[in-house]
Image: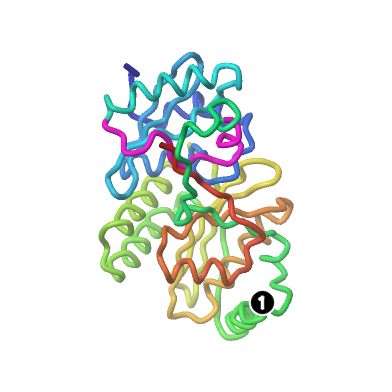
Amino acid sequence: MLDFKILTLEDKKLFDKYLKPYLFETCEYSFTNLFIWRKACDIQYAIYKDVLIIKKMDFDGNYHFMQPIGYKKENLKDIVNYLLKNKSLYNLNYLFKDAEQPFINDLLEVFGDTFVIEEDRDNFDYIYESEKLINLSGKILHKKKNHYNYFVKNYDYKVSEITAELIQTCIKAAREWCYKHMCKGYLLYELKSIEELLKNSSKLDFIGMVVHVNDKLSAFTIGEKVNENLGIIHIEKADSDIRGLYNFVNKTFIESYFSEIPFINREQDLGIEGLRKAKLSYSPVKFSKKFNVN
């Protein structure tokens, strides 16, 4: 039986050892993401034969393993068979969730059609070209550019990086936005994650930006450079009553901090209709698929 431990901030060095060598495309395999959702998703980990095993709960309350980190193709069969034995012990609904395409390819090569593999569309990550997010060029993004231009011309605003002095103000703003939208379920989990992220800002790898409109903090966003090709936007909050503010935040943050990175991951839509519509409207270049395995 695996000896699972609760994920803590002190585990960052260990996780970096396993995560940094791999060019993951989804948000799930960022230590920052794992840490801030560790309570909401009861994230725990164990080491088996020098391979990192992560156990996680989804938002429906069902547990699963994430794909093993640090395996080699020659030991994958042994690892997966061992996890299969542990599946019933931990009452897991799936053997694996959050599995990426390269792992699925290896699984198929080693096990053939032993497993039922399903695409998890609600959890696909949206990948965009940073150049398009910055320039807002083309017919599809024309409305976004108009909203951006309206904001720039009609509002008195100030942009700055999130510093220690702004953390409590950001947390207060996040709480206000959450309660404005009936702060429960996923939104409450998200609020707790934002608080975790900001309170541990000095120990986590991220960049944050705030926008003051008429001297009031009206938006903030937080992102992370995970490798030379990919940046992840973990959080983006703005006052939706201010026309063009979301468009301004989206464009300005990438332009200021991620312009040298070719692709931006703006995470999943969770099957939320409005969120899906908003993410599709920015014309993603592709999806980073995630799979369920049983």
Identify which residue, 70 or 266, lies in the foreground: 70
How packed mark 1 is, by other alpha carbons closer than 10 Å (few <14, some 14-19, many 20 or more), is few
Residue 144 image point, x, y percent: 61, 77
* Residue at image coords 43%, 40%: 97
Outermost residue, top side = 49
The region drawn magenta spans 91-106
Could you tell me which residue is drawn at 50 percent across and 20 percent down?
A: 51
In this figure, which residue is indicated by the disc labeled 1?
A: 140
Task: Tell me, yes or no, whether the highlighted magenta stretch contains residue 104.
Answer: yes
Q: Residue furthest front?
A: 113
> In the depicted view, which residue is nearer to us: 145 or 47?
47
| Pick the front one: 161 or 232 | 232
In depth, the one of 89 and 183 nearer the eye is 89
Is residue 133 inside the magenta stretch?
no
- The percent coordinates of residue 204 (x first, y second) are 50, 39
Label 1 element class? loop
Q: Quadrant of the C terminus?
A: top left
Residue at point 63% right, 68% down? 283
Tell me the amino acid under the disc marked 1.
Answer: Ile
Number of numbered labels in the structure image: 1
Image spot of residue 76 (x, y percent):
54, 21
Quarter containing the N terminus: top left
| Image quadrant in which you'd find residue 135 | bottom right
Q: Tell me where residue 264 sits by quadrant.
A: bottom right
